[in-house]
C-alpha cells in the first residue's frame, strides 16, 4: 500500500516569495497518476496539477509540478494572496483501484 | 456548467444509518466515474468509494467495506451512498467528485460537501 508523505507540514511565507512543497511516496509510483490539489477554508479541493506536471484548466502558470519515482514537487513561483491554502498530493493506483492522499501542507502568510 | 450537489448529511447515533445523495448536472453522467471523498473536522482528505460510469465496478476503502454501499441512478443523474453501522470515526464532510480520464483519474469537479456527524 502506497503512503504519501508531504513536507513540510506548514510553510510560512510572504506574498511574492516562492514555495516548494514536497510529496514523497513510500514506493515508486507512476507520475502519470500523481495530482496536486489546493483547498481553501470552507471550500472543496480544486485540482491544480495532474500527471505530475500538467496544469489543469484555468490554473495560473506560477504553479508547476515536477518529479518522478518517489519524489514529487509542487512549486509556486511567486505567492499571490489567494495562494495561501492547504495543498494535497494524490495518487491513483490501479491494482486494485485506490486513490491515496498525502496529509497536506499548509501555506500560511508570514 | 458541471455541478455536483450533495445532500442527506446530518446527525446520527453510533450504529445508525444515513443515505447521502449527489445530484449531477452539466455533463454526460454515465460517461464518468464518480467518487466520494471525506474530510474529518480539521483533517485531510480520504478517498471513500468510486463507482464506474455504468455502475459495473465499485471500489471501497477498507474501513467502510461491508458498511457502505455506493450506487448510481443514471436515469436521474444521481449518486447514492448508503452508510450503515456508522461509527464516530465516520464523522466528516462527504464530497462527491468527478473522475477525469483526461486528468489521469484525478478529480476535476467537486461538490460543496455534506456534513455527517456520528455521536457516540
Image (cartoon, helix red, strand yellow):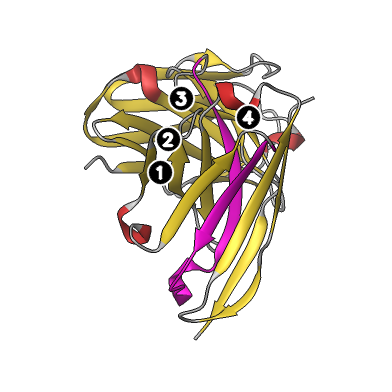
Q: Position of residue A79 (x, y in %)?
A: 67, 30
Q: Mark 1 touching mark 4, by CB under 8 A? A: no
From where the camera sits, is residue B93 visible? yes
Instruction: Tell me whether marks 3 and 2 sit on the same chain.
Output: no
Of A95 and A23, nearer the camera is: A95
Q: Mark 1 touching mark 3, by CB under 8 A? A: no
Q: Residues within 10 Å of mark 4 (few under 14, many from 20)?
A: few
Q: Secondary structure at mark 1?
A: loop
Tell me, for residue B105, which label it has, or none: 3
Q: Mark 2 touching mark 1, by CB under 8 A? A: yes
B69 part of magenta stretch: no
Q: Secondary structure at mark 4?
A: loop
Q: Chain of mark 2?
A: A
Q: Chain of mark 3?
A: B
For marks 2 and 1, the one nearer the N-term is 2
Q: Chain of mark 4?
A: A
Query: On the picture, is B68 further left or further right than A93?
Result: right
Give the magenta-colored segment's residue range: B76-101
Amino acid at each position: 500500500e502506497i503512503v504519501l508523505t508531504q513536507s513540510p507540514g506548514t510553510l510560512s511565507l510572504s506574498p511574492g516569495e516562492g514555495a516548494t512543497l514536497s510529496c514523497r511516496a513510500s514506493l515508486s509510483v507512476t507520475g502519470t497518476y500523481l495530482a496536486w490539489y489546493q483547498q481553501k477554508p470552507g471550500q472543496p479541493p480544486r485540482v491544480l496539477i495532474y500527471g505530475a506536471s500538467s496544469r489543469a484548466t484555468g490554473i495560473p502558470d506560477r504553479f508547476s509540478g515536477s518529479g518522478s519515482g518517489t519524489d514529487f514537487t509542487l512549486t509556486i513561483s511567486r505567492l499571490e494572496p489567494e495562494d495561501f491554502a492547504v495543498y494535497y498530493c494524490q495518487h491513483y493506483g490501479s491494482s486494485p483501484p485506490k486513490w491515496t492522499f498525502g496529509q497536506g501542507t499548509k501555506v500560511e502568510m508570514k | 456548467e458541471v455541478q455536483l450537489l450533495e445532500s442527506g448529511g446530518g446527525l446520527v447515533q453510533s450504529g445508525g444509518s444515513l443515505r447521502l445523495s449527489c445530484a449531477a448536472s452539466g455533463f454526460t453522467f454515465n460517461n464518468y466515474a464518480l467518487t466520494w471523498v471525506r474530510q474529518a473536522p480539521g483533517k485531510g482528505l480520504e478517498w471513500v468509494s468510486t463507482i464506474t460510469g455504468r455502475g459495473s465496478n465499485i471500489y471501497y476503502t477498507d474501513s467502510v467495506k461491508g458498511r457502505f454501499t455506493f450506487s448510481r441512478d443514471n436515469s436521474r443523474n444521481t449518486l447514492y451512498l448508503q452508510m450503515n453501522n456508522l461509527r464516530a470515526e465516520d464523522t466528516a464532510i462527504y464530497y462527491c467528485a468527478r473522475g477525469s480520464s483526461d486528468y489521469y483519474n484525478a478529480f476535476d469537479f467537486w461538490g460543496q460537501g455534506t456534513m455527517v456527524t456520528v455521536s457516540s
